[in-house]
Amino acid sequence: MRKFKKAFAAVISSVITVISAASVFTNADTDSIAELSYIKPYASEETATMRSDQDYSFDDIRKMTADEVKELYSEKGLTEEKGYTVWTSEKMADYFKANFNGGNKTVLSILVKTGSDFTTSDGKVVVNEAYSTDQERLHELLLNQDGVEEQMEAVKRQLELPEDLFWVMSSHCSIRVEMDENGESVNRRYICYFISPVQSEHESAYGLMASALNYLQLNPDFDSIWHESPAIGTSEITTTTSSTNVSTVTTETTSSAVPKTTIMCDTNEVVYTVVSYPSKTVYNAGEELDLSGIAVKCRSETYWHTEDNCDRGVIYGEPYIVDGITLDPKDAWITELKEHEDGAIGTHSCKGDRFNSLVPGKYMVAYGESYQYGDKEIKFCDFMYEVTIEPSALKGDANGDGSVDMADAVLIMQALANPDKYGENGTAQKHLTEQGRVNADIGGDGLTVGDAYMIQIKLLGLKDTPESVDASAVLGLKGGDIAGIHVKSSPKGYDYSFTGDKAQEIVDYLSSLNLIVNFPENPEDYDGMTWIITVIYDNKETLNIYHDGMFISTLNGTWYKMSYEEASRFDHIIWSYSNTDN
């Protein structure tokens, strides 16, 4: 079973004096606390009667068409607007594919509400609901588990799923906070069951599960599918202001038959479902990360345990939605989604404030910090989504790799000479794309050999460009054998050394740059990380170069500017080499 650690909400706050007994969870593993997907408003007696007033067996529902089930639901007021779903085998297959990625493909967990009390075969009373003001019942609900297992078996039988078709296994009990018909908070016991067809691999399994859910939704005690998607049989919460009043139970018990103990509590506000991620998921190279437009479902979750740690549990607070959230990109973490030869995914990672320096590709954005919402500090958990960085619209970049080089001139000539193979709809793997054609049209008069010629002229340095200078000259790079390169960051945090071909490639790349002399920006205003690059020659001479974002300098203090593409490629070289063995 998937395990979660969650909290205790709404009814008990800091310290409660109660009578000690057994654990609130009847799970075989009492440390395993499973997350529940949703908290529904308390069902009124009228609603329960509406749902239970039926004489349909599982076989009756199984023989119905989807339209017939929908008509039956409509007659009983179980509409889609209220959260009820008519399931088909196709919809069931799509559900498992979307939520379980092919794993446990015909096993569902369902949540069932218990009644107020349950009487066992030997006359014991199991308390299933309690208000915060009734300490005696609250004690029984949280700590007295005598008879709960018998109740779980009795409720399982009342589900009335045919034993020759389904396995139904009791999983665990948990306590949730919900609103009663008078708007008061009440603590209620719910039971979770695992359901699976006996022949789970048979082609009819999805159809059986669909019929089971269609049948179970007629049961007044059925609550939801236990999963982090909107639950079946529940009403959607739309308010952004709902909250649960927290009270402290301090009444002394009058019973002296058993010793008293103290319950300790630790409450947190957490995100348990993401309603909407940022709408911007496709970026051009060089753009900043945008973490706006986020909406989440939150709730309070409070761990509780007795002073001797023999008993423990969790109660969930009433959920609420927070929307219009904008998170700080510097607290996000970006990981490259690229499979390498060794099977590893995402060897290149950085913080969100360096997003604009990443090269084109697919990345995973993750956020695990807290967000201040009024007087609540909400903790984000499992917040991850995928983004794509596309090549920038760089003039001359015909192949879309983020830079302009001889390969771009070659591709232009190939596309003009053999469009069937290298044109926009060509058969070659690396043919010209629509964006590549726009980038390649330097002259603005359509794609011609003149565009390829202009790229070559620029690369050969034949065009007079007094605004730029050769990097090898102004940085002091000179010929000679390179012993190694030492790269460290300021502020401290990264420290790398490269030798051999890697060191030589870094020097060669720096030497190839055509640096801009006149630019409006002030490098001193840059407050990001600085690379301090020390080139070490075989004769022990050294040369220090400083790289801040798009700016580069030596000890003489003169700053030069690289193009965005040149700076991004240089950063990428450093990052990629730092994640490989030297």
Image (cartoon, rainbow, N blue to C red):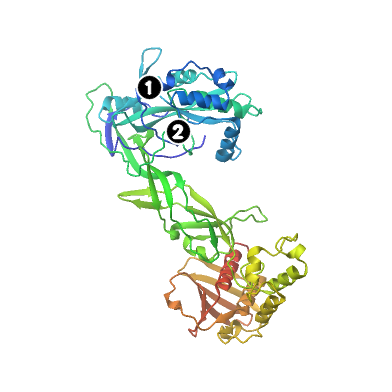
Q: Secondary structure at mark 1?
A: loop
* Residue at 61% over, 73% down: 395
What residue is at 34 percent from the left and 34 percent from the top? 308
Report whether 532 appears left or right of 369.
right
Any part of residue 145 in sight: no
Q: Horizontal and vertical percent for residue 227?
A: 49, 36
> Residue 447's image quarter?
bottom right
**Count of numbered circles in the view:** 2
Q: Is residue 70 above or below residue 446?
A: above
Find the distance from the CA under tag 1 to the CA under tag 2: 22 Å
Please state which amino acid type lies under the numbered disc 2. Answer: Gly
Q: Is residue 383 above or below residue 188?
A: below
| Left or right of 180 in this view: 525 | right
**Residue of label 1:** 115
Please identify the quadrant where the C terminus is shown.
bottom right
Q: Residue 516 lies in what quarter of the image? A: bottom right
Please identify the residue farthest to the top as the structure is shown. Answer: 122
Q: Residue at x 26, y 36 (%)?
A: 247
Query: 40 and 448: which one is in front?
Result: 448
What is the secondary structure assignment of the residue under circle 2? Answer: loop
Q: Between residues 40 and 268, which one lies in front from this camera angle?
A: 40
The residue to which callout 2 is attached is 83
Q: Please state if 63 lies on the left or on the right of 11 as rendered.
A: right
On the image, the x and y values in percent for residue 357 come to 53, 66
Badge 1 density bin: few <14, some 14–19, many ≥20, Cα 10 Å = some
* Residue 478, position as x, y percentages in the image: 62, 84
- Give me the residue at 59% from left, 40% from top: 101
Q: Nearer the viewer, residue 501 or 166?
A: 166
Foreground residue among 181 and 314: 181
Residue 196, how many percent across, how many down? 57, 27
When the figure is inspected, residue 500 is found, relative to residue 560, above or below; the finding is: above
Q: Earlier in the sequence, mark 1 or mark 2?
A: 2
